[in-house]
Image (cartoon, rainbow, N blue to C red):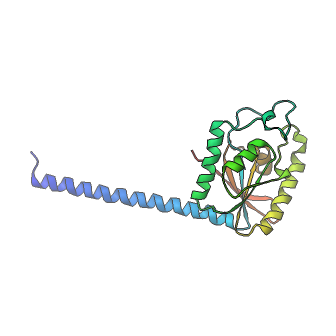
């Protein structure tokens, strides 16, 4: 038998649960907004750059005798990779990254990733090119990348600096493996070298 006291207790408990749930939701929202502000604020400064490994392109390396002038001769994004690139761009804008200077490796999978992110265009940058087929170029390539970053952070203003490149380039730059479509927020010094970094998992 449900007594008036029991009914009152149930209602009171339900009310407290609703209030508690609302407070938890507000706390999570505040945390998300704080993270978003941290990312966009960092990228507006001249101390941070965002490196992105191109979105998912099945396989390893490129077919024999590929050429940069012919995308069909290269390893390219599949449907999931294209959707992944779209999600990356959408997610960055949701974080408050509204304006960006985007640079990409000359490889088609990087160019397609940069294009599908849908910022205001992108430019090709040779220092982001893959050296997977000739690892002896790793050190030289990394030095060129640091020089490029050092130049760009001086002139980018409050726009984010976003670089779409390859696994080998990111690993050489900071010594960490990341997955396709993953991002790395890097604090850099005046010479373009990495001071510290934070890996950001690709949005699902």
Would you place residue 118 above or below residue 66 in this image? below
Q: Residue 185: image x %, image y %?
A: 68, 56
Residue occupying image coordinates x 57% and y 61%: 36
Foreground of the two, 36 or 71: 71
Q: How many tags in the picture?
A: 0
Residue occupying image coordinates x 46% and y 58%: 28
Residue 176 visible? The answer is no
Residue occupying image coordinates x 69% and y 52%: 184
Foreground of the two, 177 or 162: 162
Asked if residue 146 lies left or right of residue 56, the reply is right
Would you place residue 171 above or below residue 33 in this image? above
Would you place residue 45 above or below residue 132 in this image? below
Q: Quadrant of residue 130?
A: top right
Residue 70 visible? The answer is yes
Q: Residue 157: image x %, image y %?
A: 74, 69
Q: Residue 65: image x %, image y %?
A: 87, 31
Asked if residue 196 lies left or right of residue 94, the reply is right
Task: Report the residue that reaches farthest toward the top.
Answer: 64
Foreground of the two, 25 or 103: 103
Residue occupying image coordinates x 36% and y 59%: 22
Q: Residue 171: image x %, image y %?
A: 77, 46
The N terminus, quarter of image: top left
The C terminus, quarter of image: top right
Q: Quadrant of residue 80?
A: top right
């Amino acid at each position: 038998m449900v007594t008036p006291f029991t009914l009152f207790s149930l209602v009171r408990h339900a009310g407290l649960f609703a209030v508690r749930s609302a407070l938890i939701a507000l706390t999570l929202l505040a945390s998300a907004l704080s993270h978003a502000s941290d990312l966009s604020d960092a990228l507006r400064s001249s101390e941070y750059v965002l490196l992105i490994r191109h979105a998912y392109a099945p396989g390893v390396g490129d077919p024999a005798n590929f050429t940069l002038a012919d995308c069909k001769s290269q390893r390219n994004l599949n449907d999931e990779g294209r959707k992944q690139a779209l999600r990356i761009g959408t997610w960055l804008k949701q974080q408050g990254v509204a304006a960006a200077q985007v640079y990409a490796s000359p490889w088609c999978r990087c160019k397609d990733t940069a294009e599908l992110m849908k910022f205001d265009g992108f430019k090709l940058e040779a220092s982001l090119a893959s050296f997977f087929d000739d690892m002896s170029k790793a050190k030289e390539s990394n030095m060129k990348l640091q020089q490029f970053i050092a130049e760009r952070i001086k002139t980018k203003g409050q726009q984010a600096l976003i670089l779409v490149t390859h696994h080998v380039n990111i690993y050489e730059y900071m010594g960490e493996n990341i997955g396709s479509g993953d991002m790395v927020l890097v604090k850099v010094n005046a010479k373009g070298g990495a001071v510290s970094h934070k890996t950001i998992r690709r949005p699902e």
